[in-house]
C-alpha cells in the first residue's frame, strides 16, 4: 500500500503545547497488541502474572531506578494492560527560566512521559520476544492513555481504581471474556 498523507496520518492525542516532562503525576494505561491476554490471569480477583507479566512489572519498577526524577506510585499489571501512576519530580530544575520541552509528535523529549513509555515498551517488547522467539512481533498497542492527575482527591481515586482492578476484571471492558 502506498503512503497517502491525506489517509494515513496519526494525530497526537496529547495536549497541544503541554510540557509532558513537567513535574506532575500521570495515570498511565498501556494495552497489549490487539488486547491479547499475554501477561497472566486474574484468578479469584487476584492478578497472577506469568513470565511476560513479571518482565513488565520488573521493567515498570526499574523505570524509577534508571531515572532519578521518577517515582513509581501504585500500579497493576493485568492480563492485557498495565495501569500505573508515574510521578515526575522537579529535581531542582529552574522552572521559571528554562525553555519548555514541548513534546512534538514523533520526536523524543528527554524525560517526557512519552519518552519514558516509549523506552518501557521497547525494552519489554524485546525481552518478551526473546523468550517467545518471535523477534519484531508487536507486544503493545502503538499508543497509550495518559491522564494528568491534578489534585490529591483525584490521585487517591486512581490509586483505589488500580488496587481494585483485579477484583473488577470480570466487568472490565478490557476483558475479552466480558461480553457486555
Image: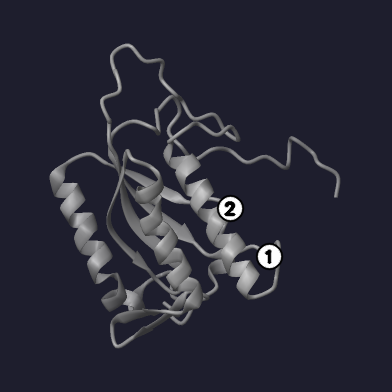
Quadrant for residue 132, please give it: bottom right
Residue pictured at 55% horizontal, 73% vertical: 36
Mark closer to the observer (1, 2): 1
Give percent across and percent down for residue 159.
Answer: 22, 58
Give percent across and percent down for residue 113.
Answer: 42, 41
Q: Can you tell which mark lies on residue 142?
A: 2
Tell me if 161 is positioned left or right of 42 in this view: left
Q: Residues within 10 Å of mark 1 (few under 14, many from 20)?
A: few
Which residue carries the number 1 mark? 137
Residue pictured at 26% horizontal, 77% vertical: 167
Give percent across and percent down for residue 34.
Answer: 58, 67
Q: Quadrant of the C terminus?
A: bottom left
Farthest residue toward the right? 2
Quadrant for residue 76, please give it: bottom left
The relative height of residue 133 versus residue 23 in the rendered view (above or below) is below
Describe the element under mark 2 as helix, strand or loop: loop
Residue pictured at 53% horizontal, 55% vertical: 121
Q: Residues within 10 Å of mark 2 (few under 14, many from 20)?
A: few
Residue sitting nearer the eye, 114 or 151 = 114
Farthest residue toward the left? 153
Amino acid at each position: 500500500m502506498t503512503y497517502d498523507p491525506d489517509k494515513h496520518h496519526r494525530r497526537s492525542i496529547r495536549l497541544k503545547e503541554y510540557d509532558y516532562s513537567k513535574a506532575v503525576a500521570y495515570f498511565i494505561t498501556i494495552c497489549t497488541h490487539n488486547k491479547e491476554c499475554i501477561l497472566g490471569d486474574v484468578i479469584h480477583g487476584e492478578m497472577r502474572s506469568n513470565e511476560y507479566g513479571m518482565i513488565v512489572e520488573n521493567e515498570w519498577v526499574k523505570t524509577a531506578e534508571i531515572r532519578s526524577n521518577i517515582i513509581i506510585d501504585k500500579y497493576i499489571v493485568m492480563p492485557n494492560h498495565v495501569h500505573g501512576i508515574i510521578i515526575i519530580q522537579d529535581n531542582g530544575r529552574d522552572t521559571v527560566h528554562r525553555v519548555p520541552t514541548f513534546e512534538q509528535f514523533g520526536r523524543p523529549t528527554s524525560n517526557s512521559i512519552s519518552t519514558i513509555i516509549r523506552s518501557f515498551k521497547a525494552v519489554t517488547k524485546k525481552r518478551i520476544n526473546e523468550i517467545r522467539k518471535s523477534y519484531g512481533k508487536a507486544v503493545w498497542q502503538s499508543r497509550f492513555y495518559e491522564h494528568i492527575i491534578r489534585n490529591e482527591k483525584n490521585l487517591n481515586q486512581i490509586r483505589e481504581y488500580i488496587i481494585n482492578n483485579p477484583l473488577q476484571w470480570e466487568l472490565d471492558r478490557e476483558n475479552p471474556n466480558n461480553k457486555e
